[in-house]
Amino acid sequence: MSDKEKEEALSPEQSPVQSSVLDEGPPQVVIEVDDVNFSYVKGKEVLRDISMEINKGEVTAFIGPSGCGKSTLLRCLNRMNDLIPTAEITKGEIRILGTDIYDPEVDVIELRKHVGMVFQKYNPFPKSIYENVAFGLRIQGVNKKSTLDEAVERSLKLAGLWEEVKDRLDSSGLGLSGGQQQRLCIARTIAVQPKIVLMDEPCSALDPISTTIIEELITELKNEFTIVIVTHNMQQATRVSDRTAYFYLGNLIEMDETTKIFNNPSEKETEDYISGRFG
Amino acid sequence: MHDQVTDDPLLKTENPFAKKATAVGRRDKVVSIVLRAGTYFILLCAAYIFIDIISKGAPTVFQSSPPFINTDFFTESPQTLMTWETEDGEYFKMDFSDYSQWRRDNPDRPIVEEHSHAYSGGGIFGPLVGTALLTLICIVVALFVGLTTSIYLNEYSSKGRFMDGVRLAIMNLAGVPSIVFGLFGLMFFCLFVPVFTETPLERSFFVIPLGGGNHLSFEGWGTCMMAGGFTLAVMVLPVIIAACEESLKAIPMGFREASLALGATKWQSISKSVLPYAFPGMLTASVLGITRVAGETAPIMFTAALAHKDKLPWQDVNSLGGFFSQSVQAMPYHIYTVAARIPQSEYTKPMQYGSVFVFMVLVMSLAALSVFLRIHYRKRVKW
């Protein structure tokens, strides 16, 4: 597997990425995970020897059975695991836009402004819709009404929520339906204009119709953002993602174009999982 | 019965579901009666207390003529009540100040029998003011220390044995008898805490000269409302910390994560996405706790309270320091005094019951306020 990674790293221009936005040139790597081990508690590694590259403007899906480490890796990418005192990367490094994000020089606050996150359980603040979207800008010290108005409108439009809520921006974000709340959370995340949006099972708490809407939204958003999505739902991975990484028991088994992973995986384990033999 | 499988006996009886007297059924009934009796017993106790206090205290507080409230009882401080009989058989009952006036006005009327009843005349203005001030100091100190501690414990501290120990220690404080807090307050706030002074006391634990004639002397604040308020605050802290931590725990983790993921600093995320939603709960729980310590006697009897004081706190005081460095009267201590430290007679009763009645209404309305606040805020903030 590491051989394959090397091959890709050596000749990125040869990797036949089908992503529509990238027709202009070779894919640009924004996230490099380089031989990473990670543990929540000392001595018990939940991620082992993970190496991967995530390309700009693509949707990358992490799939795998529960407890395989896909969410853990996702939360490493914006250092949300810092919230757990004993959690640490024990080997390797993660580079985003070429910078090692676990370097002591890196300000995690600045990192998170560029690497946004959407959570499994939609969690809008008990504030108005407007204030929810404006929150990220406000904590950065932006308080100019016109700037905020503009950002709120743009973000809500991007999140496909503008038409539904434009007349009630002052009402509570919690008055929306589940799917709308999750789109509000997406709007809140993209309002600070991150480069990368991480999504941790964004549809697992939603009904099928809301899920479809969010999936369409993700496809649209990849024009502006690099998206990494963790999903339990393999159909979802095939629908939204350009590339898919399959994790099992803390190891990255295989990462390739989504069509290849689902039609012609090179590893037996991947095939077993996607054909529903376990997981 | 079980031998008649083919011929079900249930079908033969007229009402197959009729009640049967069984041991299990009887036990059920007994249990239900015992449980009910326990509950009603409490209700009975509460009813007795309320009815007794209201029926005996209300006549002191209310009057039949407008303005229907005995204003003197609320605007005057406690005095000695004088009763006397003159030679001509007339009987008098007056507060001590009025009594002196009467003596001056009627020098020619000899008195045959005279009684004084300490603290039974006048009103309860002094104790009310004192309790208000003590409670205010207590609220400020307890909220500040309680909020900071609970935020630290819940948001900043790492999990582990040490922090569990700290929590356990704080919780154990809640079980310490109030008299121990009183003695602690006396030793620590009245006799030990450092003060700036030009003339350190003889008994000062140690003195650090600061130059310019100033000293930092570990001699305590003396018996004063600061010491009393701080002692009450220390006593209510475990309750406040526990309540505040519960309120913080009730805020979904998602708020903190979402906020952090948007690039908020730790304090930004706590102050903007946690505290605003936890604050109502913290406040109401704290008010409830403070209401309870406001009624405590033991913590203030060594540290702040006086049985009698002629002047109100703001009389004859020329600095803020001086204001907080004086002793005060306080409702619980006043009640203790009139109930247990003076000879009882029919003349002392109105003051006793009046004070208790007013104090009870006061504390209960504060408690009701906190409950009201909680309901009010719960309606407004939901997730």
Image: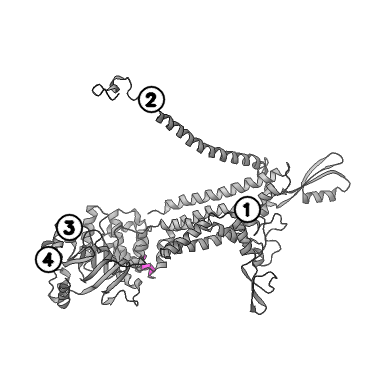
- Left or right of residue B156: residue A108: left
Front-most of A248 and A78?
Answer: A248
Q: Residue A137, percent across and down?
A: 36, 68
Question: Label 1 to label 2, Cα distance in Å?
Answer: 57 Å
Identified by mark 2, the residue type is Lys
Magenta range: A135-142
Assess whether mark 2 and mark 4 are in contact (beta carbons under 8 angstroms): no
Q: Earlier in the sequence, mark 4 or mark 3?
A: 3
Chain of the residue on which disc 4 is drawn: A
Residue A81 position in % (x across, y down): 32, 66
Q: Which residue is mark 4?
A: A266
Q: Are marks 1 and 2 on the same chain?
A: yes
Q: CA distance from mark 4 to mark 2?
A: 74 Å
Res B297 label: 1
Of tags 4 and 2, the one toward the viewer is 2
Label disc, if present, on residue B20 of the rendered structure: 2
